[in-house]
Amino acid sequence: MDTNAIELKGVTKRFGNVIANDHVDLTLKKGEILSILGENGSGKTTLMNMLSGIYFPDEGQIMVNGESVTIRNPMDSFELGIGMIHQHFKLINILTAAENIILGQIGQGRRDMKKVNKEVKDLIDRYGFELSPTEKIYNMSVSQKQTVEIIKVLYRGADILILDEPTAVLTPQEIEKLFDVLRRMKKAGKSIIIITHKLNEVLEISDRVAVLRKGSCIGTVETSQTNAQQLTEMMVGEKVHLDIKRTDPVGCEKRIDVRGVSVRDSEGLFILKDVSFEANSGEILGIAGISGSGQKELLESIAGLQNIDSGEILYYPPGDAPVEKLSEKSVQEIQNLKISLSFVPEDRLGMGLVASMDLTDNMMIRSYRSGKSKFFTDRKSPKKLAEKIVDKLEVKTPGVETPVSKLSGGNVQKILVGREIATNPNVLMVAYPVRGLDINSSYTIYNLLADQKSKGVAVMCVGEDLDVLLQLCDRIMVLCEGSVTGIVNAKESSKEELGMLMTGGRKVERSV
Amino acid sequence: MTLLLTFIVAAVGQAVPLLYGATGEILTEKSGNLNLGIPGIMYMGGISGLMGAFLYENATDNPSAFAGVVISLICTVIASALGGLLYCFLTTTLRANQNVVGLALTTFGVGFGNFFGGSLSKLAGGVGQISVATSASGYTNFFPAFMRNIPLVGKILFSYGFLTYLSIVIALIVTWLIVGTGYGLNLLAIGEDPSVADAAGINVTGNKYIATVAGAVIAGLGGLYFVMEYLGGTWSNNGFGDRGWLAIALVILALWKPSNAIWGSLVFGALYVLYIYLPGLNRATSELVKMLPYVVTIIVLVVISKRNKPENQPPASLGKAYFREDR
Amino acid sequence: MSKIARSNKKVIHMVKRSGISPLKAWGIRLIAAVLGLIVAAFVIVGITGVNPLKVYEGIIGGAVGSPRRIWVTVRETVVLLLIAVGLMPAFKMRFWNLGAEGQILAGGIACSALMIYGKSIPAPLLLFLIIVCSALGGMIWGFLPGLFKAIFNTNESLFTLMLNYVAMQLVTFFIVFWENPSGSNSVGIINPSGKEGWFPALFGSDYGLNILIVLIVTVVMTLYMKITKHGYEIAVVGESQNTARYAGINVGKVIIRTMLVSSAVCGLAGAVIVSGASHTISTSTAGGRGFTAIVVAWMANLNPAGMLLVAAFLVFMQQGSIQIASQYGLNENASDIITGILIFFLIGCEFFIRYHLKVVNTEDDKS
């Protein structure tokens, strides 16, 4: 049969007023690996969720093996031979690997776990995974959980596999193993879609690449006839000149001194291990690493949100004021010191802001304790601040009484960053500041950070796009599995060097 | 010795409705539905069975115990299933808050029971309390007399009606259902994380309905046991008391396992009647002893939340509505 | 090929509304209430066989047919409102305080104890003590679940539920000492002659003080939630504990403090019921109001004006059906059935306020 495995015609999905997918046309040929490439927020996952039955398209047609179908729920999707491996694992913590694998696959009657465990074990051995079928999920590492997800789809015998950002949480060795499995499955005649935003992986694994941008499909190209440059252009729309103004740091003074900080999770495993570094005023310190390498915990430790096991965090105020030991203080005590330690967390609506509150109330999150009265809140100055931010950063909102949940991602981030820099901070920490933002909003944020730096603020920026980090930051610290593997001068370093450090390669000490 | 014997028998009598209620509630909670309407459903189940038997006995001159049992069973099953259905429709299909619906259902169900229990004979044109002695006789003495008369063992093991034995059988069946079947696995997944179950192709809504309605029916049988075997076929307003809430407490003590609920119900049943048999109690202190089941439950609740062992926690999605496209 | 879900069907699809005007929302609730009344009418007719219009005439008569009935309806409404207002801060914090029943009883016990043992205390001081101590009684009942929620994250809905029955047993415990006449197993009217500890008549009504107290507490609590720092902290904790930590809010402290406030108001409701209305205490002093108030607070979206409206409607129907029941010689539990039906309709209609149904017509490849 020479039909396409999947064909999408004019598929559209809206969430309220936001169009996630706008008349997308896409084909997956039988027995090929198709990459879907796009920036964060370009609608990749939403599109695939319509194939797996999680979302229902508002318009358009889906064809599987040449027949028009309606996928109303995941069951329909299974019956069509589609298996999706989600970015967020769909596993039940209290069940074993094998129980998760057979979930939804067996009848209502007796479940013979002995037989199932053996079947799963066979599958594990055949593909060379390392996993015990009787291990409970809550005891597993991230990569083990992903293995369970993959075996789940294999066990199910799906013909069409969709993998959503499968490599984001894996080490290079694990990625290689995964790609081997994918190639083996392709050989066995399966059709595979892999969602990613990493160009090198696209070029390595796929036969063809479909590029999504702002919810629309820009085009599909043969991998052999394209290159990174062309794909990037398709992805971002125009030739990228990462034109971030970077001035030389001036008047560098030590502001934050992190000495041998270790943090352990609830199970006693190290999330941060003996981390030491300094952050100086008037410069931007980039923090790079594979996601989940301890970036979040590091910033939260400095902000006073994380209990640290050992080590200390010191703050050196400008002028002659005495050194403060942040690691012994709560968030509120740090606020009382008037250090102006600003923090833009990764989870904007889950931590930095309250989605259901309006702009004014969100301004108060860091400042509601101030104001004349000890008991009553002051909403006048937060309202003025909100209006000022809306005006200055060109936030698109009906007014300051609008809940932030109704704003777009870029505007939400402007509100958050605007609030944090409004306090004239001495230290500014930002985590993934442009995640999910369009190019224009991203530049607004980059320029805000650069402005803060030139005002003498010590800026720390956790990022994922190495190109941006290299052009925005002065120094870049790389974390790998909770340890610092190197601190490099951004002007002299390269993506390759950072990539090596991120995956654990130690670098020769170089004075910075 | 005889005192101990009567104590055990009395404890069993208190344990049975709790076991029915707890088994039903466990099955329901495993699907993520915290049905606080169970106390009301037990009232509904009890009165409906009684009404069925009453109307039957009034309609025939020479009622048979067997027909009375069948009719009352059917009425109980239908009424409690409707209660479960109503709860599930409001919480699962219309996504109303589970606590609010459950409490409203309990208020409704208790009122339903007391209303019909108190007014039934009047509505039927008679006077006085309803009594269905014939049908109730079918609910007692499941085992033949010679077995009941075995010294010691006969009284403790064979002196009850069939609903007592059925409660244990159902608890074991539900245990097996959860631990040993594909259906149980689906249910566990739904209770922990419905989005995962949904993605695995499990019909979340359908299974929630099945578990909730089946759970309600099981709980309703507890109400039927109370009016038929315990009270002997009569009604006393609010006579069922707080047993429905004790059943919900028992779910916690049993750590969401029906097999644990079997011995747990005996512990609660014993605590419930302990004040009668404990020497040296006066009226006031015996009221304090009656507090024990709730105090024990609270202690268990605190201890499991401190221990934090994943298997012993309430189902993770308990009390939450599920909507596939939420984001 | 296995069966494929073919696309020649209309699919009904639920979509979350992005917003709805208050007018439309209350319109939907009104329709639900009317539908509920119609179904309730059928039930009443089914039981009594009377003309449904007569039945509703009877209900209206029962609720507001005489000055005394009007006062009873008002009295019951304000008590229900008071409890719902008490639950408001806890619910705003997403803390499921299902323990209002117990907190009311705890407050009621404190109040009764003062009435019984404090006869010699001067009346104004006694009144003051009753208000303070009943609130304290409620607080004791609210403190424990709050504390364990804060330190171990213990499930609060089950904890508070269990405490209701501990409180009920405590009431039966005290009845043993307070029963009057002895052997009746009930407390009877406390201080029937001297009326010590009874709420004094105010504005020419026995229930004037009840209304005044509820009015003051409602206004104060509304302001507490809206314009104080505590209220702001409660809102943040309720929306996201992560954000609260980020803001430097001590989440555990806010949980405990808010539960103390919430249960204090519920305890006060115990005094309003005992000193202000029944002048006695029994296990049915709370009488399910703690549960009904949950429905009231939730259906009104924690909006005090809405709570007043819902409470008034439910009490109106309750009092009316009690009247109907006695008119036709049925017992008063009929009111639970009627209000139950109405509540189910009102709960169900919230769905149509939050979602709307859309028919998606997918293209048909065969046509």
Image (cartoon, helix red, strand yellow):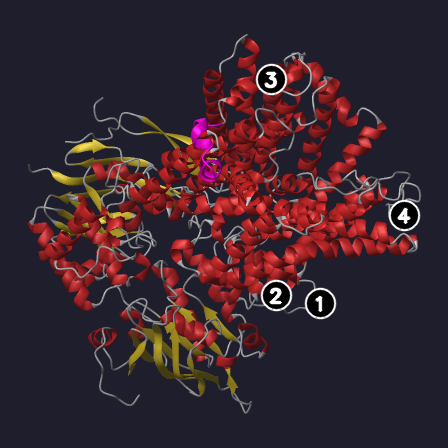
- Judging depth in this view, the residue of B15 and C13 nearest the camera is B15
Q: Chain of mark 3?
A: C
- Give the image location of residue A69, x and y in percent: 23, 32
Disc 4/disc 3 C-alpha distance (Å): 47 Å
Check disc 1 and report its element: helix, strand or loop: loop
Q: Chain of mark 1?
A: A
Between marks 4 and 3 in the image, the one whose residue lies nearer the viewer: 4
Query: Would you call the spot at circle 3 few (<14 residues within 10 Å), some (14-19), or many (20 or more)?
Result: some
Q: Which residue is mark 1?
A: A373
Same chain letter for marks 4 and 2: no
**4 and 3 marks in contact (CB < 8 Å):** no
In the rendered structure, the answer to whether residue C93 lies left or right of residue C221 reads left
Can residue A36 be seen here?
A: no
**4 and 1 marks in contact (CB < 8 Å):** no
Residue in view at x 24 percent, y 60 percent:
A144
Q: Which residue is mark 4?
A: C196
Q: Which residue is mark 3?
A: C42
For the N terminus of chain B, give its image quadrant: top right
Check disc 4 and report its element: helix, strand or loop: loop
Disc 4/disc 1 C-alpha distance (Å): 41 Å
